[in-house]
């Protein structure tokens, strides 16, 4: 049957897109509005999913217009209007349901009647996972509508967090200081406190000087920047055995919550039930422990003859919290004839990127790219142990500083760990893998999906004979620091509920002695385990904790090789 709206053959899709308004006049209105927006015969003439969608415009964060609030409001209303007429992303993160509820509840049921204060409800729910851009949105560049929802959310976060000190920092990038000084007419905080002075008669500097030191230290933004500074927290927590035990005692998750977690919840706005990373001692960090491991590569492996050279970028999560992932990767690479070098000198600044602190991110990008390019010029490939860090190096850094040669070189020569192992298998060959008779619930992390390289973790684990794999390709809901905040933890659990449910069903069907919950993202796998435990408790089910283990895919491969 032809669609009565546009005479196309996709009427069923039009109806399924709006199940809440099926057989109602609003469904017709939304479809008509969409066609008006697109000026096309049918929305579905464009592909909603594209495996090769890689084009993106650079982020103009050094342009003062980027921080112009009036310009930002106009662009936000334009994008929201297109999203409201499409609604394909309704089932993704909480940003889109919030947006659509705001529009439906407004006076005119249109974006024009939304207040700018309503925008924060949408912005604060976005974790910059890029799933809407990669998998759903049909209007991304080079489409004339030019919709990049995650980068619009990033712009909002950057305008909110930018400060007067950013003007000086921009000089490092060869940008004229006058360009960074935004005039009062722009309505932006960036580069000048003139806007604040004109509104209140008092400058930001005067206001800050009158605040007590305690007030500054206890402010939400300061505490957020403190606990998302992974290198600072990692250095403090691993400085001594006493500090490691103290930090882990303070951050441990208990039922009921401990007094320390209640204090963290009150002042640092960290949810008292959110599972926080466990730190290891200084000598157990990966950059130190790998030197005590076996350093002799397997001379019988095919890759040994090629003299391949790689550098493992350890990442803050593996270095300070989960060195066993790095040790498993090191053992597997040695077993396959490759002797890796391990490098870690600072975090990739993904937490700062999520908060919109682009100046800080650009500084880190230049320093870290220069360091890693030193190894690339010596013939090394860069293997990254966490997909979020790889996403920064491959996609976000080149968008921030597109003309930096080191960043360009790094983006072309860095690989995810599972991606590299699959590449090694196809190009050279790996040591035959013994059987491993167990089951795995394998989660495809959002930041892995965003890279458009395929489900490499699945390809890797399929190489293991007798391993039973159940894949989960939905968002776990964690979203980095978002998933541990008071306002984000419950949303993260809501978004990840389907993942928890599917994992619990896999565990119940498991007939082997153990079941692995696995993901390339170390934060997601812990969040899934906690969600599964809570879901089973709510249903009155008892889980065999000895049977369930959280593992990175490389740890499962190391287990099959009998290396750990």
Image (cartoon, rainbow, N blue to C red):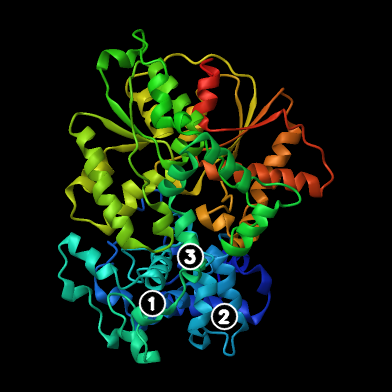
Image quadrant for the N terminus?
Answer: bottom right
Which secondary structure lies at badge 3? Answer: helix
| Residue 135 on image: x %, y % | 47, 55
Q: Is residue 427 above or below residue 532?
A: above
Instruction: Please tell me the numbered disc located at residue 103.
Output: 2
Which secondary structure lies at badge 1? Answer: helix
Q: How many marks?
A: 3
Judge whether residue 128 can be spotted in this image.
no
| Residue 385 on image: x %, y % | 42, 36
Instruction: Please tell me the numbered disc located at residue 209.
Output: 1
Q: Is residue 273 left or right of residue 175?
A: right
Relative depth, front residue between 329 and 220: 220
Instruction: Please tell me the numbered disc located at residue 332.
Output: none
Q: Is residue 34 above or below residue 311?
A: below
Q: Is residue 350 above or below residue 201?
A: above
Relative depth, front residue between 86 and 68: 68
Q: Earlier in the sequence, mark 3 or mark 2?
A: 2
Q: Is residue 365 above or below residue 372?
A: below
In percent of the image, x 45 and y 29: which residue is there? 283
In percent of the image, x 31 and y 63: which residue is there? 142
Residue that lies at the very extreme toward the right in this rendered image: 540
Q: Earlier in the sequence, mark 1 or mark 3?
A: 1
Q: Earlier in the sequence, mark 2 or mark 1?
A: 2
Judge whether residue 137 can be spotted in this image.
yes
Instruction: Please tell me the numbered disc located at residue 217.
Output: 3
10 Å neighbourhood of mark 3: few (<14), some, or many (≥20)?
few
Q: Is residue 250 left or right of residue 217?
A: right
| Residue 248 on image: x %, y % | 59, 42
Which secondary structure lies at badge 2? Answer: helix
Mark toward the viewer: 3 or 2: 3
Mark toward the viewer: 2 or 1: 1
Are dots 3 and 2 in contact, CB under 8 Å? no
């Amino acid at each position: 049957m032809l669609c009565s709206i546009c005479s196309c053959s996709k009427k069923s899709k039009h109806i399924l897109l709006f199940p809440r308004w099926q057989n109602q006049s609003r469904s017709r209105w939304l479809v008509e509005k969409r066609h008006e927006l697109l000026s096309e015969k049918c929305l579905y003439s464009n592909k909603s999913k594209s495996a090769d969608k890689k084009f993106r415009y650079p982020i103009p964060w050094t342009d003062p217009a980027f921080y112009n609030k009036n310009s930002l409001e106009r662009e936000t209303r334009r994008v929201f209007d297109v999203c409201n007429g499409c609604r394909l992303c309704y089932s993704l993160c909480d940003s889109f349901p919030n947006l659509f509820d705001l529009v439906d509840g407004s006076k005119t049921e249109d974006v024009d009647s939304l207040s700018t204060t309503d925008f924060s409800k949408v912005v604060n729910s976005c974790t910059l996972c890029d799933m809407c851009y990669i998998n759903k949105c049909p209007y991304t560049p080079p489409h004339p509508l030019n919709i990049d929802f995650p980068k619009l959310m990033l712009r909002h976060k950057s305008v909110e967090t930018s400060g007067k000190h950013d003007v000086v920092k921009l000089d490092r990038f060869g940008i004229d200081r006058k360009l960074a000084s935004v005039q009062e007419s722009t309505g932006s905080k960036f580069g000048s406190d003139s806007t604040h002075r004109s509104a209140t008669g008092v400058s930001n500097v005067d206001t800050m000087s009158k605040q007590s030191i305690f007030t500054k230290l206890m402010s939400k933004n300061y505490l957020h920047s403190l606990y998302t500074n992974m290198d600072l927290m990692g250095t403090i927590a691993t400085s001594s055995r006493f500090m490691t035990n103290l930090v882990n005692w303070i951050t441990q998750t208990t039922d009921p919550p401990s007094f320390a977690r209640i204090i963290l919840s009150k002042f640092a706005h960290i949810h008292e039930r959110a599972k926080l990373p466990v730190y290891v001692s200084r000598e157990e960090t990966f950059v130190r422990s790998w030197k005590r491991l076996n350093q002799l590569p397997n001379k019988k492996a095919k890759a040994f003859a090629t003299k391949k050279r790689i550098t493992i970028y350890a990442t803050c999560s593996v270095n300070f919290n989960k060195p066993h992932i790095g040790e498993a990767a090191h053992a597997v690479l040695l077993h396959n004839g490759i002797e890796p070098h391990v490098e870690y000198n600072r975090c990739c600044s993904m937490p700062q990127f999520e908060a919109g602190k682009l100046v800080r991110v650009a500084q880190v990008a230049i320093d870290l790219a220069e360091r890693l390019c030193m190894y690339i010029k010596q013939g090394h490939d860069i293997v990254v142990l966490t997909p979020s860090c790889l996403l920064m190096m491959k996609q976000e850094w080149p968008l921030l500083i597109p003309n930096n040669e080191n960043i360009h070189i790094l983006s072309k020569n860095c690989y995810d760990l599972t991606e590299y192992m699959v590449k090694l298998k196809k190009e050279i060959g790996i040591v035959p893998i013994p059987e491993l008779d167990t089951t795995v619930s394998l989660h495809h992390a959002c930041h892995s999906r965003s890279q458009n390289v395929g489900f490499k973790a699945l390809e890797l684990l399929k190489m293991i004979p007798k391993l039973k794999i159940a894949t989960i390709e939905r968002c776990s809901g964690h979203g980095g620091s978002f998933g541990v905040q008071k306002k984000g933890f419950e949303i993260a659990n809501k978004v990840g509920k389907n993942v928890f449910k599917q994992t619990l069903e896999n565990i119940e069907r498991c007939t082997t002695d153990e079941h692995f919950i696995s993901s390339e993202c170390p934060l997601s796998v812990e969040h899934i385990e906690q969600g599964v435990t809570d879901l089973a408790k709510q249903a009155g089910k008892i889980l065999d904790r000895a049977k369930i283990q959280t593992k990175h895919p490389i740890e499962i491969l190391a287990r099959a090789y009998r290396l750990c």
